[in-house]
Amino acid sequence: MQSAYTVLILLMLVSVSRLLGRVIPLPLPLVQIGAGALLAWPTLGLHVALDPELFLFLFLPPLLFSDGWRMPKADFWRLRGPILTLAVGLVLFTVVGAGYFIHWLMPTIPLPVAFALAAVLSPTDAVAVSAISQDRLPVPLMRMLQGEALMNDASGLVTFKFALAAAITGVFSLAEASLAFVLVACGGLAIGVALSWVVGRLRSWMIARGWDDPATHVVFMLLLPFAAYVLAERLGASGILSAVAAGMMQSWVDLLPRQTSTRLLNRSVWSLLEFVFNGLIFLLLGLQLPDIVKAVASHETSLWPTLLWRCLDVAAIFLVLMVLRFVWVQGVWRLINKMRHWRGKENLAMVPNARSCLLLTLGGVRGAVTLAGVMSVPLLLAPGAAFPERDLLIFIAAGVILLSLVAACISLPLLLRGIPKSQDDALRDHVRDAWRRTAQAAIRALEVDETPDPAATQDATQAAQAALAAEVKARVMAEYRHQLEVFNDSAQAQALAWQMDQLERRLRLRALKAQRLELYKLRRHHKIGDEVLRQVLGELDMSEASLGQLK
């Protein structure tokens, strides 16, 4: 029962922290970390033993799946150069540069272990950045940070595992590690895409046979990220990349027919899941802080001097990480723009000036992946030999996470001063154009068949049917006028009103179907992006749900 009480307390605290975030002028992640640390204070004494493997399995697959699902694929492909250089190149650059610095700063940490620590400090958290910036980051920068966070979780953790293996075995081969990295990454992507495709085909087969219950399909979607993660890990590939790829594949699978109710339920369930899981991650970090501080100073005679020196070490490592990131961002960004200019292509949407480079640098906030990775460091290097400086590694990682959050909270609002809230004019134009095209398709669909459904008016004459159809079509444009007939006391008028209501619903459903098909056609021909599709399709689904079922 104690575990159940702890879970309930944490869930309640997630909700309360959201309310506190509206009152306290701090980003929600910092509020949640502070709440967790306060709850773990000795007087309250809530202690949660964090199993890193369980943490990775429960939290990361669904969150990464959701991020991959919502990531605009057109923007991801357009910015693939900067995203890959940040997600792969910057990780390797950070591992080498920060690894040597950590070993130089603290010689008690062996070089392979320093490389492992630098690798686990590489992954970033775009969710925290979005909460801090409050959607004021320029759209191209936010897309780069989102794409980087999707991909560098895998590259950072895979590099971390190789460095950890080298620290434990004392054997490392660059050629073998590079080949294994490519195989693990490509294998994870392939497994995620294949499994998502199979689930999509299964759902399509079920829908064709009338098994279109929304709850069943939503459960399939909830299990998919976990299945992709476990299958990839069992096959020796990257489970994280597999979950990301499965989510990105769902952008196409989600367009299955007769899925209006499923899509609406799916959005609500995943919004709730993201809110709870993101909150729990930062709460758990706060809950671990007292134990982390106690462990790093347990072997020292004095607490505060030791803690002060360790905090200075953390600050130095964080500054080096930021310098390395700034150098890489500025150098590679300018190089990519020059190469695009030489090839006769237009430059990226953002000019690589000092402000944009600083925003991209300070936007590299560390989060859940770093915490989970460093907690997975084994207790023993060999039988009877403790892993060198394990408590110190965890302390440094937790300190870097906190410093990156605090630095982003202070610096991003200052750098974004004078920049209006992010508005994508191109997106707004695409949405407007999509609505115009789908409305034209709906009108064409209504004009094709001028006669109503014979089953609805089988007792009326042909002339009465034509008059009824004309009146209903006028009412579709006028809205709500038929409510006057609904309250007529005459049974005959009531039957006629019900008949006209059913006919109106058929016409509206026909128009909505035509709009949806036109929207899919625009997406297939790459005339609109995923964000436009998601926005317009959501409103069409809401309109269809409000019509109810035909009787």
Image (cartoon, helix red, strand yellow):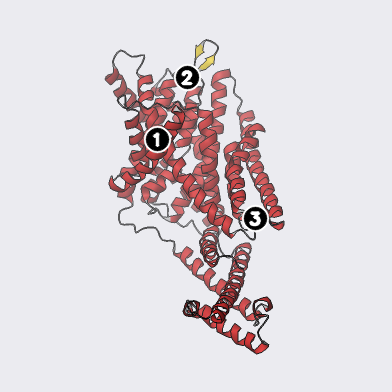
Whether residue 397 is visible to the viewer of this picture, yes or no, is yes
Q: Position of residue 454 (x, y in %)?
A: 68, 79
Q: Residue at x 62, y 46 (%)?
A: 220
| CA neighbours of label 3 inside 10 A, class few (<14), some (14 to 19), many (20+) | some
Quadrant containing the C terminus in the rendered view: bottom right
* Left or right of residue 23, residue 510 in this image: right
Q: Earlier in the sequence, mark 2 or mark 1?
A: 1
Q: Tell me, yes or no, whether the two marked residues, 2 and 1, touch with CB atoms within 8 Å.
A: no
Asked if residue 335 shows in the view, the reply is: no
- Identify which amino acid the numbered label 3 is placed on: Asp
Residue 204 placement, left or right of 344: right
Give percent across and percent down for residue 30: 34, 39
Q: For the point 44% across and 64% down, which residue is it?
A: 425
**Residue at image mark 2:** 110
Query: With 391 as the anchor, is 438 left or right in this view?
Result: right
Q: Earlier in the sequence, mark 3 or mark 1?
A: 1
The residue that label 1 is drawn on is 9
Residue at the spot x=40%, y=45% of the render?
Answer: 129
Judging depth in this view, the residue of 222 and 77 nearest the camera is 222
Report helix, strand or loop for mark 2.
Answer: loop
Q: Which kind of residue does numbered mark 2 sit on?
A: Pro
Secondary structure state at the residue bearing disc 1: helix
Question: What numbered label is drawn on residue 468?
Answer: none
Residue pointed to by mark 3: 212
Image position, residue 411 (x, y; %): 32, 45
Query: Tag 1: residue type?
Result: Ile
